[in-house]
Image (cartoon, grey):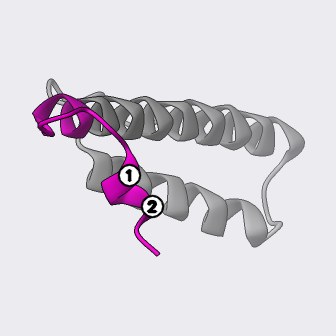
Amino acid sequence: MSKKPNKINFEASVAELEATIVRMEKGEMSLEDALQSFEEGVRLSRQCQKLLASAEQRVLLLTEDGEEDFLNDE
């Protein structure tokens, strides 16, 4: 479907995932196209989850004590 960029970009991945969802919601695809779009959506979702986990890890490493309390301020 889409070309894989050298550097994975979270915002671009989310935008592509949203576009995939919109195409699927229209309901005008053949079964095969819908399956391919679903597979692409799963791939993009997993990619986004990995990028978020990596960002969270970086934030934790950059905090002085490594605690997550600052994320849960209430």
Inter-mark Cα distance, 1 to 2? 5 Å
Point out residue 26 in the picture as x, y percentages from the top left corner: 75, 72
Count every numbered label the image shows and give the total. Answer: 2
Q: Give the labeled residue for mark 1.
A: 69
The crowding category of the residue bearing disc 1, from other C-alpha atoms within 10 Å (few below 14, some 14 to 19, many at least 20), is: few
Which residue is at a point 37% across and 57% down the rendered structure image?
Answer: 71
Q: Is residue 62 magenta?
A: yes
Instruction: Answer with left or right where residue 32 lies relative to residue 54.
Output: right
Task: Say what secondary structure mark 1 lies in.
Answer: helix
* CB-based contact (under 8 Å), mark 1 and mark 2: yes
Q: Is residue 27 magenta?
A: no
Instruction: Answer with left or right where residue 29 lies relative to residue 46.
Output: right
Residue 72 got which mark? 2
Question: From the viewer's perspective, is residue 3 above or below residue 23?
Answer: above
Q: Amino acid at mark 2?
A: Asn
Q: Report the magenta residues as a range.
A: 58-74
Instruction: Answer with left or right where residue 43 lies relative to residue 11.
Output: right
